[in-house]
Image (cartoon, rainbow, N blue to C red):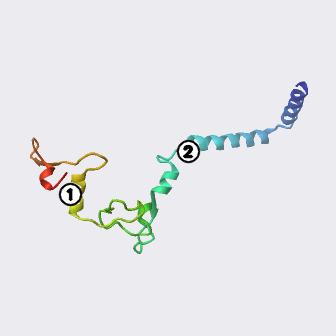
Amino acid sequence: MSSILSQLDQGLSGLFSQWNAYSTALAGALVAIVAYRVVTSTDPEIHPMRLARQSLPSAVRREGESAIYRSVDLGGGELRTGLEVKDKGASKWERGRDGDLRDVWRKVIEGDQGKRGGLKTILGSENVVGHDLGKFGGP
């Protein structure tokens, strides 16, 4: 153990025996650069990997305009055209059809995640009328 400490002592003595004004200036500059980077750095509001997965620049753009950022699940420049209604038993990767108002009503009547939907008519700020979904063909 004493040999390790004596070697450490000799190494530090050798280092400081050669220390001069240039060494002090270089060490000070190094400390100043590191301190500046630490003090002025800002963390992003969102993790960079989440930003990278959030959207991609569209491949389709108008001349003279920047690329529009679109969701990753849309692919190369195509837009969603409808409700993306998927029939029961369809693969989750299969693209849904456009759908219409009948699909919206079907979803209201069947409910979602075990909760049945409801229909209310709001007349003014205080008059709310609830409707029975059974008369619309619900279960």
The answer to whether the residues at label 1 and label 2 have Cβ atoms under 8 Å apart is: no
Q: Is residue 113 left or right of residue 63?
A: left
- Foreground residue among 9 and 128: 128
Quarter of the image for residue 105 reads: bottom left
Residue located at (84% from left, 36% from top)? 15
The circle on residue 41 is: 2
Secondary structure beneath label 2? loop
Q: Is residue 136 left or right of residue 46?
A: left
Residue located at (65% from left, 42% from top)? 34
Question: What residue type is disc 2 on?
Answer: Ser
How crowded pointer 1 is (Cα within 10 Å; few <14, some 14-19, many 20+) is rated as: some
Q: Position of residue 22 (x, y in %)?
A: 78, 42
124, above or below 96, in the image: above
- Foreground residue among 22 and 125: 125
Residue located at (45% from left, 70% from top)? 59
Question: What residue type is disc 1 on?
Answer: Trp
Q: Which residue is mark 1?
A: 105
How crowded pointer 2 is (Cα within 10 Å; few <14, some 14-19, many 20+) is rated as: few
60, above or below 1, in the image: below
The circle on residue 139 is: none
Q: Earlier in the sequence, mark 1 or mark 2?
A: 2
Q: Position of residue 63 (x, y in %)?
A: 41, 75
Mark in the foreground, 1 or 2? 1
- Work out which quarter of the rendered image holds the N terminus and state it: top right
Secondary structure beneath label 1? helix
Residue 71 appears anywhere in the view? no
